[in-house]
Image (spheres, rainbow, N blue to C red):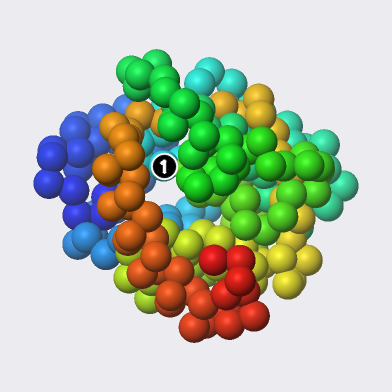
Amino acid sequence: VDDGSTDGTFEWLSQRVESRPLRLFRQSNRGPAVARNRGVAEAVGAKIAFLGDDTVPEPGWLAAHWAVHQEARDAALLAAIGYTDWHSRMRSTRFLRYINEQGPQFGYALIDDPRNVPFNFFYTSNLSLARERLLEEPFDEGFPSPAWEDIEVSFRLFKRGLRLVYEPRALVRHDHPTDFRRFCARQERAGESAVFFARKHPELAGLL
C-alpha cells in the first residue's frame, strides 16, 4: 500500500510488480493506521508481517517469524516481534543505543520473558501475527500522528487473548537519521497521539 508517496516509490514498484508475486495499491496520504488496515484487508494469506518503511530486513527475517508461528500451539492467538537494530549507515552513539534498548523508542533490554512480552512492545516495525486478529480489531485510524496506534490495537487484542513473544533472530536494520533534536520532535508528535490514547483508554494514562 503506497500511502501517498511523492518520491517515485509507486512508479518504481509498478515497473517490478509483474515479475514478482506482489499486488500494489495506492491511496492519498492518510497515515500508517489507514495503510495497514488497507493492506490487511487486501491480503489473502493467513499471516501478516509488518516492516517499517525505514527498516531493512536481514536475510532469514521472514523465516524466523514463520518458525515462531509454526512451533506455537496457540499460533492463532500469537504475535511475534523481532529485533530492530540500527543500520550500519547510522553512526552508533550512546544516545541511539539508549533509545533503542531502554524504552524511549523501543526497549528490548526491558523484556524479562521473551515468551510472555507485555502488550506495549507491539512494534509494527518488525511484527507478525494472524491476519484474522486484525480483521477483528483493526488499527484505530483516528490517531493524529503515527505513534501509539500500534500499542493501542495491541491492548485491544490482548483483551481478546493475544500473546506476544520476542524472537531476536527476526532482525531488521533501522535506517532513519536520528539525533537528539529530531528525536525530541518525534516525541512531541508522539505526545499528541498519547493524549488521544489516554482519552480512549483512561485506565492506561499512567503508562503514557
Left or right of 34, for residue 119: right
Nearest the eye: 157 or 13: 157
The residue drawn where x is 48% and y is 45% is 105
Q: Position of residue 55 (x, y in %)?
A: 41, 33
Nearest the eye: 139 or 86: 86
Can the viewer see residue 49 in this picture? no
**Circle 1 SS class:** loop
- Specify the farthest residue to the right: 73
Task: Please say if 191 is above or below 200.
Answer: above
Q: Quadrant of the C terminus?
A: bottom right
Task: Please say if 101 is above or below 127.
Answer: above
The residue drawn where x is 27% and y is 43% is 181
Give the residue number, with chain letter if any, for mark 1.
52
The residue drawn where x is 56% and y is 61% is 151
Hey, which quadrant is residue 132 in on the image? bottom right
Left or right of 25, for residue 46: right
Q: Position of residue 45 (x, y in %)?
A: 57, 49
Q: Position of residue 182 (x, y in %)?
A: 27, 43
Crowdedness of circle 1 by 10 Å Cα count: few (<14), some, many (20+)? some
The residue drawn where x is 22% and y is 60% is 29
Can the viewer see residue 101 in this picture? yes
Left or right of 161, for residue 4: left
Disc count in the image?
1
Hey, which quadrant is residue 49 in on the image? top right
Q: Amino acid at mark 1?
A: Gly
Q: Position of residue 141 (x, y in %)?
A: 39, 72
Hey, which quadrant is residue 127 in on the image? top right
Left or right of 104, for residue 109: right
